[in-house]
Amino acid sequence: MSDLPIPPVADVEGWTCPAPLRHQDRIVLGHGGGGVLSGELIEHLFLPALGDATNAEMRDSAVLDVLGGRLAFTTDSYVVSPLFFPGGCIGDLAVHGTINDLAMSGAQPLALSAGFILEEGLETAVLGRVAAAMGAAAKAAGVRIVTGDTKVVDRGKADQLFVSTSGVGVVPDGVDIRPARATPGDVVLVSGYVGEHGVAILSRREGIEFGTTLESDTAPLHGLVARLLAAVPDVHVLRDPTRGGVAGTLCEIAEVAGVGIELTESSVPVPDAVAAACGFLGLDPLHVANEGKLIAVVPGEQADAALAALTSHPLGTHAAVIGQVSDEHPGLLVARSPLGAGRVVSRPLGEQLPRIC
Amino acid sequence: MKYLDEFADPVVARRMIDDIGALATQRWTLMEVCGGQTHSIIRNGLDTLLGDTVEFIHGPGCPVCVTPLEMIDRSLEIAARPEVIFCSFGDMLRVPGTDRDLFAVKAGGGDVRVVYSPLDAVNVASDNPDQQVVFFGVGFETTAPANAMAVVTARQRGLTNFSMLVSHVRVPPAICAVMDSPASRVQGFLAAGHVCTVMGTAEYGPLVDRYQVPIVVTGFEPLDLLEGVRQAVALLEAGTPALRNAYPRAVAPAGNPVAQQVLADVFEVCDRQWRGIGLIPASGWQLSPAWAEFDASSRFAVDDIHTAEPEACHSGEVLQGLIKPNQCPSFGTVCTPRTPLGATMVSAEGACAAYYEFRRLDPR
């Protein structure tokens, strides 16, 4: 429609930077944002350094063949500020996040570890509240925290407390869930409202109210995954859209599987308060973090069964079909606006930046 | 969402697109002035949907994009000082200066903070009496009143540790700069609705008379934009350039007199460099002499920092509507949101970033 040539999309996507890291001499906050900068750090620094891992398939947890069975294994660190926020705290988050990384391989979690880095001077009562929340979250999820570690650093060398959790789980026979299995004809579902966690944290951190108090959606998803797998054993992909949001997750799936993903924007369940906050701050709800939602990619003919299974579970009440996998525009996520125009959605670079106006 | 969804109704939008198509006997070239409008047009695909009727040229209305490189370098110099807490709106942090950005200053130990209101920066100054707190005061007429209120509040509180690095810009002189360019192809303007909410519409009538182009004050939701386009196309077809207000629910002809008074009290009009464009006479605001004590540029003696823009960056031509972002040889190759050469690739409202993020696929 335009009178001007549009450069081939492949050129833009295939371009690699001659300098592997933009900020070569320093780590910037964006390196932890789960977007392009994080990916570059993994690709250009960690994978070369860590040797064998270079063949690792990018996913939320590794799956290891062990004595005839399969074990899912994952680790994650939590540095959220504030420690306590509407809907949860760093403790629930650390338990749920690692359970979810296991669940995204289809695994039922067995056990977790918990490592604490504490700042000198932290009130013991604060640590007690976090630990109690972790215990309660693990108990509610039916998972044991079986080993741990504590270190204390000088005052000012950490922000109150950081938590690191690792987890192992068992992958049931016949389950093969990984991003590379996304196939043209598949359908993409999300298990509920998007953007709640990121906006809840932002509003508490910055003291911004949006008429109603949004709560983080932090929740363990292995029960929801079990319900889904019972109805649709051949789920192709599961991911939890944490940092980078739904858009970042779908971009990664499209890249890894070499397929196109078409997203119907009007089908994505965005609560009014999230939409208002994002509109106000100039953020895109598709890029905002979630901590209790999953993206499922299932064969097209099983979409109805998958949706029914998700919506029958308390954590999937607002699940929706939001898109489909296609053999067009491989490697790209294309969002179709309510007016019918398509646009390519990119992975976020690093930190989300509120706009001026 | 009530009062927003109604202005994005796809059925009404389709009808309006058809109406505009029926109205037009030729393809008209319109400039939307504001970066927020550019973002909405690309995001909703209005440029594609109106492709046969209207060509949009994306105007110089993103404050992040037009803040000159030397002002960015001054901000980096100030922010790196150990005694300074540097406060800024979020999207200024990733604007590349000559050799780094504010994120890099922060990673190197500078105290750089994102604030959502300039008054938050004043509170930071109250809370940190032993530190110098500097706010990066950028933006058009929309953000200027709140920034003016920040220095008023700082004086009321007797704060001597607050100052502002001011790089404010004004829309009407930018419209003149675009129209005075011999290469300009712009046949009509969608004026920035929120700027007019503050300033009213009186400044635009003389521009209609001078350049004989229609100017339609326009909002930001899809139907707002389509209504602005519809009125502009109708005026162009009739050959009767005029000033119209297609955003009356937010824009009163007189604007916001209280905000205008604060602006008049605190700022004075000055010449201003625009990134990629150059000097535009009377296109900016600076603190007036009565408020000069709050001027960070003189407090930190960075007035003598002058920098040239990279030659490979054609953002000036993009901002003047002479080329589309994807006609720049650097677009998507050496210049991406990850490695921006110019600010138009940095801000989500910048024309180049909008093209890159939402670059269109051929319609099926």
Image (cartoon, grey):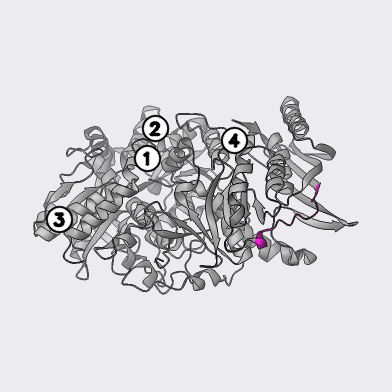
For this rendering, which residue is in front, B146 or A12?
A: A12
Q: Which mark is residue B294?
A: 1
Question: How far apart, in angstroms, are the residues tagged by discs 4 and 3?
Answer: 49 Å
Above or below B328: residue A288? above
| Chain-order first, disc 2 or disc 1 | 2
Counting from the top left corner in percent of width and height, residue B126 is at: 47, 30
Quick one: SS at disc 1? helix
Q: Residue furthest top?
A: A125
For this rendering, which residue is in front, B264 or B25?
A: B25
Question: How far apart, in angstroms, are the residues tagged by discs 4 and 2?
Answer: 36 Å
Question: How far apart, in angstroms, are the residues tagged by discs 4 and 1?
Answer: 41 Å
Q: List the residue tagged with mark 4.
A: A216
Above or below A255: residue A189? above
| Chain-order first, disc 3 or disc 2 | 2
Tag 1 subunit: B
Quick one: SS at disc 2? helix
Above or below A16: residue A166? above
Q: Which mark is residue B154?
A: 2
* Numbered disc in front, either 4 or 1: 4
Quick one: SS at disc 3? helix
